[in-house]
Amino acid sequence: MTVEAPKLVIRNIGLILSGKLEEPILQGDCVVAENGVITAIGFAGDLDTDQAVTTVDAMGITLAPGLIDSHVHPVIGDYTPRQQQLNWIDSCLHGGVTTMISAGEVHAPGRPRDIVGLKAMAIASQRWYENFRPSGVKMLAGAPVLEEGMEEHDFKDLAEAGVKLLGEVGLGSVKTGETAKQMVAWARKYGIQSTIHTGGPSIPGSGLIDKDIVLEADADIIGHINGGHTALPDNQITCLCESCLRGIEIVHNGNERAGLLAMRTAFELGQPERIILGTDAPAGSGVQPLGILRMIAMLSSLGDIPAEIAFCFATGNTARMRDLNSGIIEVGKSADFILIDRAQHAPGNNMLESIHQGNLPGVGMTIIDGIVRSHRSRNTPPATTLPEVVAS
């Protein structure tokens, strides 16, 4: 469901993060969007800013693409039975997340494991999150978990019904590389993207998925390569990075040291575009509303990479790998933004330097499809400066 928004102008921007590794910082102080899509980027004096229905004064702070959480486990609406928690998606919006991608609706009580039931649940999940966006957040859901006995026509049926994702391979009864490989290939044939569980078991019924299974299955995304929760041995993590060209997903709900190892290996291979970020929430460790921001700060500070590059892992990299029209500040892309600044009294001369030192920024506003969805975050530390809606 897309809600069209009239003309939006964001002016007086101090810094624009693009989400693109090849050009992480853009020149300009103004962005214009119409009907939820970016139409112009540059300096206000050169752009058509007239007749804006909503004008935001950024007050000199940073504009970045809305963050994308590449790995969540939703169930229905804005409720998760895993932690008996309401409004967890709205809480993540206050952590700057504007898009979430399901890795399987595995926490649904009584989740069907028969083929008819799992297909029905996947289609229903895809539909209800398409029709209902909690707090405006884009939830890409309907990710069936593979079970023994599925055949090619099942994937064709799912694709024709609008399902575009597979749940984590390995969370169901399919745990061998040979069977997973066949089903992943069927899914790919019909345009369904796949993610594979990596590491030790996470929930009852799951099991160890080691490097050999991951490589044989050849899923599109190496899900939580740093474990969810338990990571593989270091040599298996580096082998996975070196032996294929699939997405390297690092999650908050995993081993941080292993995550740093995976990131450094990707850079050594000259393939930072493969790195994407997720939280793996809701999970046994709960919901992490600031999980993506924390991953950005952790990887930047302990991994010693510029903060503007780390932001790309949670925006443009994920958008490109997942074929999304968001995550990049570029004409024609969705007008999904966050306005952020250095946290009050945080060290560092500016926001990027502060993040590189391991500190979280303050989120001052989120915008999805050109519509302001939240103002000062209730979850991040307070930003030094806040943007203002000056006309609406």
Image (cartoon, rainbow, N blue to C red):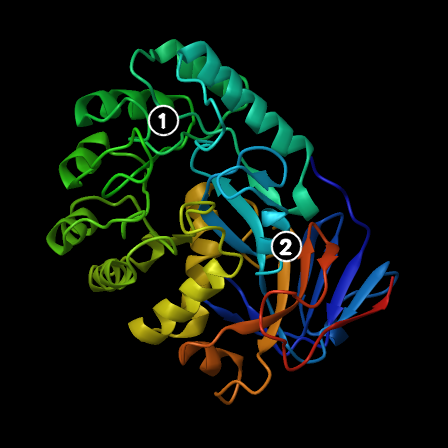
Image quadrant where one finds the C terminus: bottom right
Identity of the residue drawn at 63% across and 77% down: 383
Nearest the viewer among 364 and 308 is 364
Relative vertical location of residue 266 with respect to residue 300 in this rendering, above or below: above
- In the image, residue 311 lies at what x, y percent? 46, 64
Q: Earlier in the sequence, mark 1 or mark 2?
A: 1
Q: Give the structural element (helix, strand or loop) at label 2.
A: loop
Q: CA distance from mark 1 to mark 2?
A: 28 Å
Q: Position of residue 157 (x, y in %)?
A: 47, 13
Q: Nearer the viewer, residue 21 or 105?
A: 105
Q: Which residue is mark 2?
A: 336
Few, some or many C-alpha atoms within 10 Å of disc 1 (few <14, some 14-19, many ≥20)? some
In this figure, which residue is indicated by the disc labeled 1? 188
Q: Is residue 20 visible?
A: no
Q: Quadrant of the N terminus?
A: top right
| Residue found 31% across the figure and 26% down from its top | 184
* SS for callout 1: helix
**Callout 1 touching callout 2 (CB < 8 Å):** no
Task: Tell me residue 88's x, y (percent).
Answer: 59, 48
Which amino acid type is marked by label 2? Asp
- Compared with 52, 347 (above or below) is below
- For the point 83% across and 61% down, which residue is it? 54
Q: Amino acid at mark 1?
A: Arg
Res. 308 mark: none
